[in-house]
Amino acid sequence: MATRPPARRASSQRAWLITYPLALFAMICLAIFWLREPEWYREWPKGLLFFVAYLVAYRDVFNIVIWRSAFTVAVTDVPLVLALFYLPPVMVILVVGGAILVQQLWSHAQPAKMAFNTAKSAAGNSAALLLILALPEIRGRRAGHVGDPGSRRGHRRARRAAQPGRCAEPGPRLADRP
């Protein structure tokens, strides 16, 4: 009877085949974003705040156990979405990539895994930023350039609408529609 050959273990050498293109894509996007907005470093206080928030989000993980099944939920998407909205693109790539690198160093990851996870995160964030730049502006603003989230005119309108006796007439009821 023929025997099967022993299964080969995957080596970390093959991981570099995908790590290099991811890192190259992230670095090209970083350079393009840097050229588009050379004054990105002026937002460093917000970047430091998001760096700490991201580290805390990586550190705190919710473990949910239902009967014999365990689920782990990390809340890293919350600071990421906020960073995509409030930070310049270069700062987003550096902050999130740096936080993941620190987290990987903290967990004593192997060099190939550490490099892959950092490059994967930077490339993913670069792709997200490219997608955000392709989207139309919202109220004359793009993500990464929010400034004051509410305008004075919008606050005045909201205050006037909230005053008693200023409510709009109700729309047609569902039963009144043809």
Image (cartoon, rainbow, N blue to C red):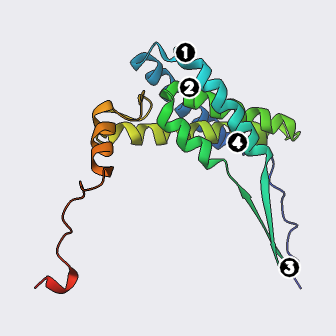
Whether residues under marks 1 and 4 lie with C-beta atoms below 8 angstroms apart, the answer is no
What's the CA distance linking mark 2 and mark 3?
42 Å
Mark 2 is surrounded, within 10 Å at the Cα level, by few (under 14), some (14 to 19) or many (20 or more) other residues, namely: many
Q: Of the residues shown, which amino acid type is indicated by label 1?
A: Tyr
Q: Is residue 9 visible?
A: yes
108 or 12, which is in the foreground?
A: 108
**Is the residue 10 above or below the residue 99 in the image?**
below
Residue 48 picture quarter: top right
Amino acid type, label 3: Arg
> What residue is pinned by disc 2?
91
For disc 4, the neighbor class at 10 Å (few under 14, some 14 to 19, many from 20) is some
Q: Residue at x 74, y 33 (%)?
A: 101
The residue at which mark 3 appears reads as 68
- Give the percent coordinates (x, y) of residue 115: 73, 36
On the question of residue 13 being in view, the answer is no
Compare marks 2 and 3 and give the one earlier in the sequence: 3
Q: CA distance from mark 1 to mark 4?
A: 24 Å
Assign a secondary structure to mark 4.
helix
Secondary structure at numbered mark 2: helix
Reading the image, the residue beneath label 1 is: 41
For label 4, the residue is 117
Of 36 and 151, nearer the camera is 151
Q: Mark 4 is on which residue type? A: Asn
Q: Which amino acid does the dot numbered 2 rest on?
A: Met
Callout 4–callout 3 Cβ contact below 8 Å: no
